[in-house]
Structures are given as C-alpha cells and as structure tokens.
C-alpha cells in the first residue's frame, strides 16, 4: 500500500535524524597507532572556532579561510582522517571556553595566548607560537612608547591580552575598544585613534601590506599561543601535541612558518 510505505519511510528518516542529533558526537581514531579515539562534535570534521580576521593566523581569502593556524590544524585533521571546518565566532566565547563547552567546536585556534585565567576555563595544547605585544601608528608619528601617548587615544582589541597590557601599562592614556583587529587597524589609519596595541605577528603583517603605518615599539610580554580544547578533552589535546611535535621535528612546521612569516627573524 503506497500510503503506508510512505509513512514508514518518513518514520525511518525521522528516526535516523533523531539518532544523529541524540548521539551528539562521533569519534575517530588517529592514523598513527596507539592513539585513543578522539570524539568530534560533527562527524567527519574537525570543527575549529576562530575569530576572523586575524591575519596571518586566520583570514578569509575568497571562499577559503587560510593562515598559519589553519595550516597547523589541517595537519591534525589529516591525522584524524577528517577535514577541518572553521566557525567564525566572537573572541569572548572562545577565550572563556564557552564555545567549547557548548559543543560549537572541537578546538579553538585563534592566535590565542595561554593565560592562567583562560587555562581555568579550557585546556591548552603545548605552546605552538611565541608572541609579544606591539604598538602600531601612522608612519612618521611620534608615538613610539605608551608614555608618549599620554592624553591620546590608544586602540585595543576587546578581550585580548593586548587590552589587558594597555590597561596595566598605559596610565593617562585613553583606551578605545574595538571588537576585531580589522576595525582596530582601520581606526589607526583613519586617525580615529593615535595608535593601537596588538600582537606583533599580526601587526608586522599589517604594516607590510600598509606602508603608511609602522610598528613603533614592541613590548616583551613573552606570550605563547596554544590551541584550546574543552576542559578534560585529553584525547584531542594529546593528539594535537603529538601532531605539532612531529611537524616541528620533520620540518613541516618550519615550512608553514616560512610561508606565513616571510620576514620574521625569530620564532
Ligand atoms: N593573542 C591575543 C590574545 O590571546 C589576541 C588573540 C586574538 O585577537 N585572536 O588575547
């Protein structure tokens, strides 16, 4: 009877869909032997939370999102025999661990500095990149230190270590908060702020492409970036560490570094 078989098909479809939703996540085994299985929030994908743009760590190029972090996480995805899918989401939900806890993504890769506060809310991979804070201003400006900005406007990016650094080290300077680094750097260019603080890797890339701006100071904050996973997700955290260590040992890390930081003297 056609009517009956139609409804049966419908029930089957609904049941399958419900099962997929109920099961919530799937697991995959790394191709290397001995690894425990890694649970993923979306089947067949390694889902990454990031906050765009953060060039050269992650930036949209046409239809793709590319960058240093993207390439490193791709190595992990390859090992897990899945593909990386990137979710663009505000930095606040990333650094508080909220997105990871909500199952929005498996890991966070956002040029994110390892800090004690963040480490309470999410687990970090081993450090994969060294960074410091830096100051950017229009070329030829006299703003070469935080002291020189007394009574002036200093742009900061909301929720970042750069914002915290400016709040602690720039007394008498008016900080102006921006939601992302693109808005922050545009504000420097247009003169809405006199200078801005952000991570050195991002600012050096920006001034390379915007010769009317320059990095006028670096502050040795000794930061290290880590990839974030949900607290207790040791299987994925260890897998990331294994893959990055292997890539450091066999030269793939260096090649990726040279690709995204062509002018960088150190790492
Ligand atoms: N490294 C900085 C931090 O962790 C900036 C990160 C970012 O803006 N994506 O706060």
Image (cartoon, rainbow, N blue to C red):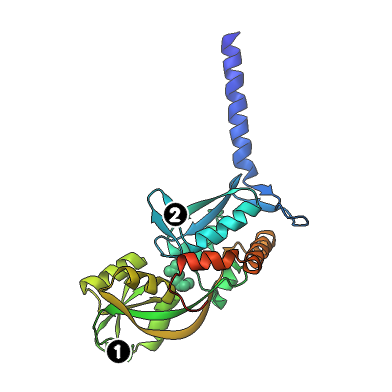
User: Could you say where residue 263 lies in the image, as x and y percent from the top left?
Assistant: 43, 73
Q: How many marks?
A: 2
Taking depth in this image into account, of 212 and 45 the one nearest to the observer is: 212
Taking depth in this image into account, of 222 and 172 the one nearest to the observer is: 222
- What is the CA distance from the residue labelled 2 to the residue labelled 1? 39 Å
Q: Mark 2 vs mark 1: which is more N-terminal?
A: 2
Mark 2 packing: few (<14 Cα in 10 Å), some, or many (20+)? some
User: Could you say where residue 220 lies in the image, as x and y percent from the top left?
Assistant: 46, 86
Q: Residue furthest bottom?
A: 147
Taking depth in this image into account, of 118 and 142 the one nearest to the observer is: 142
Helix or strand or loop: what does disc 1 sit on? loop
The disc at residue 65 is: 2
Of badges 2 and 1, nearer the viewer stands 2
User: Could you say where residue 141 lies in the image, as x and y percent from the top left?
Assistant: 24, 84
Q: Quarter holding the N terminus?
A: top right
Helix or strand or loop: what does disc 2 sit on? strand
> Quadrant of the rendered structure where residue 207 is?
bottom left
The answer to whether 223 appears left or right of 81 in the picture is: left
Residue, x 23% and y 83% (percent of image)? 140
Q: Quadrant of ligand 1?
A: bottom left
The disc at residue 94 is: none
User: Could you say where residue 3 lies in the image, as x and y percent from the top left?
Assistant: 56, 12
Residue, x 40% and y 55% (percent of image)? 60
The answer to whether 10 appears left or right of 26 in the picture is: left
Find disc 1 in the rendering and name its residue. Answer: 172
């Amino acid at each position: 009877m056609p009517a009956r078989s139609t409804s049966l098909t419908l029930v089957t479809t609904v049941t399958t869909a419900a099962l997929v939703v109920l099961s919530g996540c799937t697991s995959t085994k790394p191709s290397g032997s001995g690894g425990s299985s890694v649970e993923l929030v979306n089947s067949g994908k390694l889902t990454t939370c990031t906050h765009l743009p953060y060039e050269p760590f992650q930036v949209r190029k046409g239809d793709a999102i590319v960058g240093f972090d993207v390439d490193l996480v791709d190595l992990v995805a390859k090992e897990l025999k899945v593909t990386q899918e990137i979710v663009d989401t505000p930095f606040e939900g990333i650094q508080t661990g909220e997105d990871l806890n909500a199952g929005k993504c498996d890991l966070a890769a956002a040029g994110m500095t390892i800090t004690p506060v963040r480490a309470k809310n999410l687990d970090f991979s081993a450090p994969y990149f060294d960074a410091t804070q830096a100051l950017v201003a229009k070329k030829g400006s006299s703003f070469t230190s935080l002291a020189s900005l007394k009574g002036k406007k200093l742009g900061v990016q909301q929720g970042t270590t750069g914002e915290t650094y400016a709040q602690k080290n720039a007394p008498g300077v008016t900080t102006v908060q921006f939601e992302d680094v693109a808005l922050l750097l545009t504000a420097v260019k247009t003169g809405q702020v006199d200078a801005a603080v952000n991570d050195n890797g991002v600012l050096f890339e920006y001034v390379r492409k915007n010769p009317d701006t320059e990095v006028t100071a670096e502050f040795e904050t000794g930061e290290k970036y880590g990839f974030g996973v949900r607290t207790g997700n040791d299987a994925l955290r260890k897998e990331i560490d294994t893959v990055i260590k292997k890539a450091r040992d066999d030269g793939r890390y260096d090649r990726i570094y040279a690709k995204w930081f062509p002018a960088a003297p150190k790492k």
